[in-house]
Image (tube, rainbow, N blue to C red):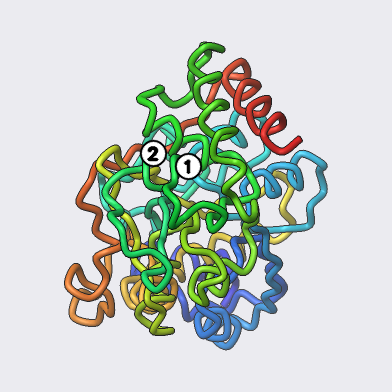
Amino acid sequence: MTLRRALLSATALFALASAARAEGELHLYIWADAIAPELIAKFEAETGTKVTVDAYNSNEDLLTKLQAGSSGYDIVMPSQHFVRIMIDEGLLENIGASTLPAFAQVDPKWQKQWWDDTGDYSIPFAYGTAGFTVNRDQYQGPVDSWKVFFEPGPELQGKIALLSYPDEVVGAAELYLGVPFCSEDPAEMKKVLDLLMAQKPYVAAYTSDNIENRIGGGEVAAHFWWDGNSMKTRANDGAHIEYAMPKEGLVGWLDSLAVPKGATNLDNAKAFIDFLSTPENATIQYNYYGHASPVALEKDKMKYTPENAPELFPTVKVEFSRACSPAAQDLVTKVWTQLLQ
């Protein structure tokens, strides 16, 4: 069976999509440890396609890679605001996403959102929040406000770690200060810089690597982090940690599957996106990844629930990062550059 016929069959009978013989190659450039290894093995076995995976740790790294051209990758996994940036810069293929079987599995509230309002370029893959986690062996105080993190008391001074890039960190500071995301007002962004500069003497590291060991092992008492990663370290590794629910809110993110412009294995990329989005496979992925799923799951097989994984079910407002204007992004860059000088 050719891949073209397989995809046509998948449109008529979605459950058989993963059985198509795709063959050839597929090259992924995605967040580290983002896709369940068993699903990659399953896809390879069912289609004859050889899948290779490379990883990145920030949307900025991904954007730089695609801007350089000829990346050699067939699927990438940008967050919502970077999907918008990549579409506007002509870095993604129009894959007719809304016509794929995968799109029918996406919860309507995530379909054709502002980051891909035509539904041509991406399929939502996972979503969640960015906030901060505390080690309860190191810190026993409240975690109900960003004030705890950005204006730390003696228990946390010198024991805080942030990410290595500004995106969600600046967003969290804006939430705390009441500054709108993507502000073009230098005076408002000066408030953000002042807050982060005042915090800096108490920061042990600005890093996005090895967070689970750093916070789980108590090397630091508080770390900027993501909901599902914190949950898995607590639930699976037994770390005595807690993911905060600050009253000012959390920074939201949604990662999507997209295809870089000029990808050489376009049909295989579409087949893989459809494969990951079946309820069976999406549930396997959810149970592995530990982040909320925007596609339909087999609810009786879901590992994580509000009872055992409260990190995934926020009780405070969530504000999603947006694609900022060049003027606003320039201010963010200036804030971060001055901070790390």
Q: Residue at x 55, y 19 (%)?
A: 190
Q: Earlier in the sequence, mark 2 or mark 1?
A: 1
Q: Nearer the viewer, residue 289 or 174?
A: 174
Q: Nearer the viewer, residue 49 or 198?
A: 198
**Dot 1 amino acid type:** Gln
The mark lying in front, picked from 2 and 1, is 2
Q: Residue at x 62, y 61 (%)?
A: 30
The residue to which callout 1 is attached is: 80
Q: Nearer the viewer, residue 32 or 75?
A: 32
Residue 284 percent coordinates (x, y): 38, 79
Q: Is residue 16 visible?
A: no
Residue 230 percent coordinates (x, y): 41, 67
The residue to which callout 2 is attached is: 320
**Dot 2 amino acid type:** Phe
Mark 2–mark 1 CB contact (< 8 Å): yes
Q: Is residue 187 above or below residue 164?
A: above
Q: Is residue 218 above or below residue 104?
A: below
Q: Residue at x 38, y 64 (%)?
A: 139
